Image (cartoon, helix red, strand yellow):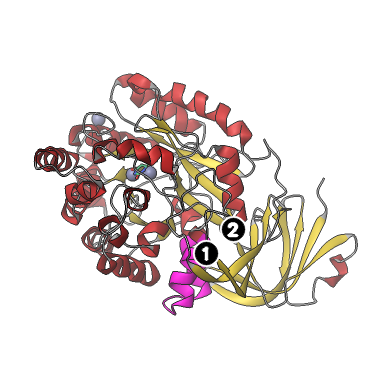
Amino acid sequence: HSKRLYIKGGTVVNADGELAADVVVSEGKILDVGPPGSLDARLQSAQVVDATGKYVMPGGIDTHTHLDSIFMGKNTPDDFFSGQAAALAGGTTMHFDMLMPNKGGDILGGYTRHSEAAKRSVMDYSFHMVITHWSDQVSEAMGKLVEEGMTSFKFFMAYKGKLQVSDELLMHAFHRCRELGALPLVHAENGDAIAYAQQELLKAGITGPEGHQLSRPPAVEEEATLRAVTLAKVAGVPLFVVHVMSKGAMEVVARARTAGQRVVGEALSSGIGVNQSLIWYSDFRTAAKFVMSPPIRTEEHRLAVRAGLAGGALQLVATDHCGWTYAQKDSGRNSFLELPNGVNGIEERMHVTWHQLVNSGLASPSRFVEVTSTAAAKAFNLYPQKGAIKPGADADIILLDPNIAHTISASSHHSQSDANIFEGHRIRGKVIMTISQGKVVWDGRKLAVERGAGRLIRRQAHGPLFHGLDSQRQAELLSFGHVPVSRSDTGGSSKEEL
Ligand code: DUC
Ligand code: ZN
Ligand code: ZN
Ligand code: ZN
């Protein structure tokens, strides 16, 4: 049994506002939140945390990571231990990892394998199951996973010949998601257009990291985003668009939302924190460090996506953490096709977002909480268990001191990689304490984590997906012949709008 914590004298920030308040934590949960001093009767036998001058906020939720994964034939350097330790040191207390299927598309096999790796975990986590093939068995397995609380499925529209799925598969899977009350996620890039451009570039003798950028212009992201949003509309299912990296794709998401479609757009810390200039003007390793898909784009796109995240065109910010070592990136020296895609962020996201949104004056601390935590909890049906400092919520809490400045560097980060795309970024505002499951696991200097302490967080299905649609529109959607099952028996909730 962990000791009670009494977090005294801070400013509690939730997505709906901030107030001066004390917080009492007990048995992994938030027991009480009250005006300063009002809970002093509970001081006895509690460990007091002085939060004077600090923001007390929900721990970050990273909706998109690749830990302990094989991607482009390589093992990611961060497993569930090192990746989550890094996350906690950066104020993130839960993440969703992309779960790759076994060869041949055996998704339940992939689930079993990955749960083994997750035993090294030190904080709460969940999964999105990646679907690369379609069959009756896959469709059935999706149902089993939803019963087990894994209610989101990821589809790659790029990586032709490998992970890429067809539009027809998307239609099958989107309908199945609708039946199950599950949420589909898409990596939206036109993989065919990319494959064509890759071959043309190689023929022209362009083999360096700049070839990666040239093969994946913003338009191929925008096109695939519109296609995915359109297919989701046809299927009558909500949609989560991962890593929106360009202005045009962001506008597609925003327009769909304005028209009443349930679409969630995910920004990345890399997308709001850095631009692509070093890919063009540096040595191989410095350039290669920034190579990910969709690509990190120009300053114009960075500023647009940052403003969209602050202003509401995008709903949340994740990382796509898949940070490779320089040595691993070296395998792309002869051809950008062999350059492992991916960048870090799991430890830096909270700080980068604080700096880019709050220090810049674009957003309030409440909006920061919304995009780093609350919106993720809502999108994946975990609110208010996660994403809020409210009585009854999980005690995943951070303290941020807005006056401490620090510099991001690979020499001090907790990831197993030796590269950091935010190297040298000076950030005002530091997470000086992370509380996970009611325990202090990071005090601003040291981690106190325990292997195996992490829990797989199961989620309920989203419930009736026609919320807010008139009966004629519902009938139109139903004409595709996939009748959604009644969710009343599973307790699925549709209370929270995406
Ligand atoms: N893009 C990356 O850069 N890395 C991992 C997966 C992805 O889609
Ligand atoms: Zn179907
Ligand atoms: Zn992706
Ligand atoms: Zn990813």
Give the x, y percent position of residue 407. Answer: 54, 66
**Residue drawn at the location 54% of the way across and 37% of the way down:** 79
Look at the numbered disc 2 and give the secondary structure of its residue: loop
Which label is found at residue 69? Answer: none
Q: Position of residue 304 (x, y in %)?
A: 29, 69
Above-or-below relation of 128 to 422: above
> Nearer the N terminus, badge 1 or badge 2?
2
Query: Which quarter of the image is occupied by the C terminus?
Result: bottom left
- Residue 301 can be seen, yes or no: yes
The magenta segment is: 350-372
**Amino acid tagged 2:** Gly
User: Residue 495 or 184: which is nearer the viewer?
Assistant: 184
The vertical placement of 41 against 196, above or below, is: below
**Identity, as a three-letter code, of the amino acid under mark 1:** His
The kind of secondary structure element at disc 1 is helix
Q: Residues within 10 Å of mark 1 (few under 14, many from 20)?
A: many
Above or below: residue 158 compared with residue 15: above
**Count of residue discs:** 2
- Name the residue beneath numbered marker 2: 91
- Horizontally, residue 439 falls left or right of residue 493, namely right
Give the camera-side residue of 487 and 64: 64
Q: Are marks 1 and 2 in contact (CB under 8 Å)?
A: yes
Q: Quadrant of the N terminus?
A: top right
Q: Which mark is residue 351?
A: 1
Q: Would you say the magenta stretch is mainly helix, strand or loop? A: helix
